[in-house]
Amino acid sequence: MTFADLGLSPKVLSAVTDAGYTKPTPIQAGAIPHALMGKDVLGIAQTGTGKTAAFVLPMITRLEKGRARARMPRTLILEPTRELAAQVEENFVKYGKNHKLNIALLIGGVSFDEQDKKLERGADVLIATPGRLLDHRERGKLLLNGVEILVIDEADRMLDMGFIPDIERICEMIPFTRQTLFFSATMPPEITKLTEKFLHAPVRVEVARAATTASTVTQRLVKSAPKPWDKREVLRNLIRAEADELKNAIIFCNRKVEVSDLYKSLLKYEFDAGALHGDMDQRARMAMLDSFRSGKLKLLVASDVAARGLDIPDVSHVFNFDVPIHAEDYVHRIGRTGRAGRSGKSFTIVTRSDTKYLDAIEKLIGQNIEWLDGDLSTVVASESDDEAPRRGRGAPRRAGRKDEGERKRGRRESPAKPAEEMLADAEAPAAEAVPERSERKDAIKADNAARGSRSGGAKGERSDKPRNDDRPRREDRRRRDDDLNDGTVGFGDDMPAFMLIEAKV
Ligand code: AMP
């Protein structure tokens, strides 16, 4: 089957050809003909399946008839995040290059005035996050009774983010006669209820069984002792071991505060890392994303919410620094790699307290994930979840001494929290804001200048020979700590050995 078989207009077909796509993906082949006939569509598809074009292409074709009126958009696309909304806009620009479409983007972090002007001109396509859309409506600048096509994208993420009441309100504001195109990667009961309420005799197009991971992704579990510094060490070792194959990677954390901590730790160990979380302003997020997309940045640390639906083609690796609490998130995370038939790798760092979540994931995806190097039974008993690793005479020195420093400074994490609490924390403000890329680069530059010794080697990593442990050199540690001002007090990493001898009682 080709795009020409789907019933798209010649102008749209020409833009698709220019984009270099020759064959529709299954969700496109399944959804486009029905969408062109004006039917409601329920598309069950993960990101990476080409689902954006599955609604953008028929919409542009249908928009060729008629024109927009001031403040009365003709179509509305709801997206859960700003980035995803911006990406959909890019798709309209790409596939609408032969049309004169007025596109308005209503997302947070951009002034209302600018957005009002676009609405005033009359929008053919309105792309919005639910909160900002309702804000505009309440200001009286937006009328939704001219909407002919409504798209609800990433519905299960909307559910996770608590947007379902907003979505219901919006659906009720739009004429009953509209066409609705509804997309979700998974179909939890709340989403099924929503489709029953707001879709009319929808055509169901399911491209992969809900919650399956692509067969092109090699998935592995990696055991770790429970503390964050243990996990960071495991992660560093994994990244190094994968260096030859690792083109770029997304590293997922469950909570914003972990995104921030891990990002800083990776920079200290001279990895080429950036971070993405909900607290960053729009410009900083876009700049970070652009650097990652263009390949300037190799590692991107992100929370689920921040990374959801981002179109980053060809990610070679996904690292789950934390096992996701929602099993569906595992599927979404893994969906970042192995796209469009390419091969990809994922590594999930697992501690003993994660087994409940791991079981749920394996049940959901219907397969057992292989361990990379033995399962948790080989994690030494003294490093149980309730007890920090003990140090004493004869105890092996641990590799990540900077992280030990954090522990000595009393930055212990509180005991494991219940899942609900962790979810509540998931988008709580980070302890420290992630520095902008410019600051990040300045910190690295200052560090390099201080050492005056960095040439060749893999981008972002130390160029000299690997040592048999990954401790930063003593003199470097001091300088780096100064540069990044991480507040080391007392002995820091340089605790004299005698202080580590356990007292006999
Ligand atoms: P999406 O699922 O919409 O996030 O799309 C995932 C990626 O697939 C994007 O980079 C699209 O540009 C790309 N894509 C969309 N349609 C096709 C197609 N028919 N053939 C190849 N790639 C496509």
Image (spheres, rainbow, N blue to C red):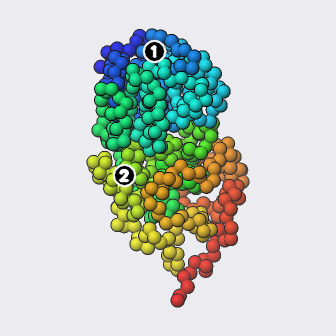
Q: Position of residue 12 (x, y in %)?
A: 43, 15
Q: Quadrant of residue 47?
A: top left
Task: Report the side of 261 relative to 80 (left or right).
Answer: right
User: Quick check: can you spot residue 64?
Assistant: yes
Q: Does residue 322 lie above or below 118 as drawn?
A: below
Mark 2 or mark 1, earlier in chain? 1
At label 1, counting other C-alpha atoms closer than 10 Å, the crowd grade (few under 14, some 14-19, many 20 or more) is some
Q: Relative to 129, is 392 above or below?
A: below
| 239 sits left or right of 378 in the view | right
Judge the density around disc 2: few (<14), some (14-19), many (≥20) Cα neighbours within 10 Å.
some
Q: Which residue is mark 2?
A: 220
Q: Secondary structure at mark 2?
A: strand
What residue is rendered at 59% in x and 45% in y?
A: 279
Decide: is 400 above or below 75. Answer: below
Q: Residue furthest bottom?
A: 505
Q: Residue at x 54, y 14 (%)?
A: 69
